Image (cartoon, rainbow, N blue to C red):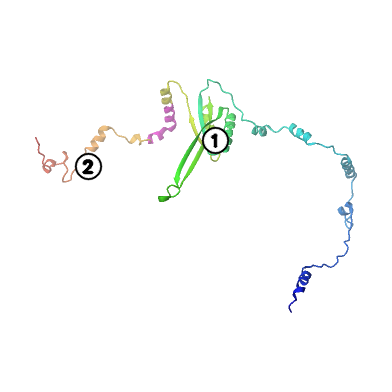
């Protein structure tokens, strides 16, 4: 049965009302901390005199008022605490071994990257590695940036005017090693290559210095290499024991079996050592 229009608002209002039954009074039960820690049904635990003495000491310490420490005093106390040397070194510039003005340059390491942050991190790492290898390193010295630009059409044919520009900037740093032993420099470069940071490119120019008698030094080094290799050196370019003398090789080439194998006895061959070779080919002298 339809509800008249004047009663619809009252009916909808009654439907929206949520009448809850009266709730009984909440009964609160209080228990002490000792009752919570040791319920009535649990047996009492025997306490030794030493435990009682310890509990009394803790109670006395807790009863003492705590001194108020402000932020400034706390900051001073924290600054007084010395960090380990290894931790302090990460917040300071890398240490350097001194070099003399007369020292010659042994290696020039150039670092390249598109990210300046990665470049600075790896340059700092390279300087610390050089210090612990007792190398006199200077740098990292900033080099001019390399800027490259490209213009590429976005589309072809009639859309040629719609073009897009691209730019790539390469940042560079240079580290110079002076008066370093070649083997130590090689170890340093190998260590950097093993722990190379992502996005970093390296280019090294290594210089070695020698005396005026370089030829004698090279001959002595060649003799040492020959002694180390021994019989393996004979395998370079063919075994020398298989080589024959020049006269023996010429006799093999001019022998009849060798010529026959290469077609000297064919119908059109004109080898002088072949029987009746002159009758096969007629030769006329043209004046």
- The quadrant of the image that shows the N terminus is bottom right
Residue at numbered disc 2: 257
Residue at point 25% right, 32% down? 247
**Left or right of 48, for residue 105:** left
Residue plotted at (67% across, 34% down)? 87
Q: Position of residue 213 (x, y in %)?
A: 42, 21
Give residue 73's quadrant in the image. top right
Q: As drawn, which residue projects farthest toward the front?
A: 6
Q: Quadrant of residue 98?
A: top right
Q: State how many labels appear.
A: 2
Q: Which one is nearer the viewer's eye here, 237 or 74?
A: 74
Main secondary structure type of the part rendered in magenta = helix
Per the image, label 1 sits on a secondary structure element best described as helix
Vertical relation: 183 (above or below) 163: above
Classify mark 2: helix, strand or loop. Answer: helix
Position of 86 compared to 66: left or right? left
Q: Quadrant of the C terminus?
A: top left
Point out residue 62 in the picture as x, y percentages from the top left corner. 87, 42
Residue range of the region highlighted in magenta in the rendering: 221-235
Question: Where does label 1 land, which residue?
Answer: 192
Question: What x and y, as percent, mark residue 111?
Answer: 52, 34
Q: Which mark is residue 74?
A: none
Ranked by sequence position, the earlier of labels 1 and 2 is 1
Q: Is residue 39 left or right of residue 130?
A: right
Give the class, few, some or many, for how many residues have Cα within 10 Å of label 2's Cα (few <14, many ≥20). Answer: few
Of 8 and 84, nearer the camera is: 8
The label nearer to you, 1 versus 2, is: 1
Q: Indicate yes or no whether the magenta region holds residue 224.
A: yes
From the viewer's perspective, tell me whether residue 107 is left or right of residue 74.
Answer: left
Q: Is residue 178 magenta?
A: no
């Amino acid at each position: 049965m339809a509800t008249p229009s004047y009663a619809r608002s009252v009916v909808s209002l009654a439907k929206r009302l949520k009448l809850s039954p009266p709730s009984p009074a909440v009964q609160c039960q209080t228990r002490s901390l000792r009752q919570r820690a040791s319920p009535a049904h649990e047996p009492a635990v025997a306490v030794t005199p030493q435990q009682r003495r310890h509990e009394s000491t803790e109670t006395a310490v807790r009863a003492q008022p705590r001194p108020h420490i402000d932020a400034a005093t706390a900051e001073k106390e924290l600054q007084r605490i010395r960090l380990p040397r290894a931790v302090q070194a990460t917040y300071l510039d890398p240490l350097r071994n001194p070099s003399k003005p007369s020292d010659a340059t042994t290696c020039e390491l150039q670092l390249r990257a598109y990210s300046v942050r990665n470049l600075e991190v790896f340059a700092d790492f390279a300087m610390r590695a050089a210090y612990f290898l007792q190398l006199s390193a200077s740098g990292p010295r900033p080099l001019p940036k390399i800027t490259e630009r490209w213009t590429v059409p976005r589309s072809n044919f009639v859309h040629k005017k719609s073009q897009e520009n691209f730019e790539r900037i390469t940042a560079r740093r240079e580290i110079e090693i002076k008066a370093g032993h070649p083997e130590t420099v090689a170890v340093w470069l190998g260590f950097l290559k093993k722990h190379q940071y992502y996005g970093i490119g390296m280019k090294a120019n290594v210089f070695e210095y020698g005396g005026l008698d370089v030829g004698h030094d090279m001959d002595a080094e060649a003799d040492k290499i020959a002694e180390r290799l021994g019989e393996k050196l004979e395998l370079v370019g063919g075994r020398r024991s298989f080589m024959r003398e020049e006269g023996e090789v010429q006799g093999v080439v001019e022998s009849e079996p060798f010529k026959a194998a290469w077609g000297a006895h064919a119908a059109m061959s004109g080898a002088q050592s072949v029987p009746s070779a002159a009758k096969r080919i007629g030769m006329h002298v043209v004046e």
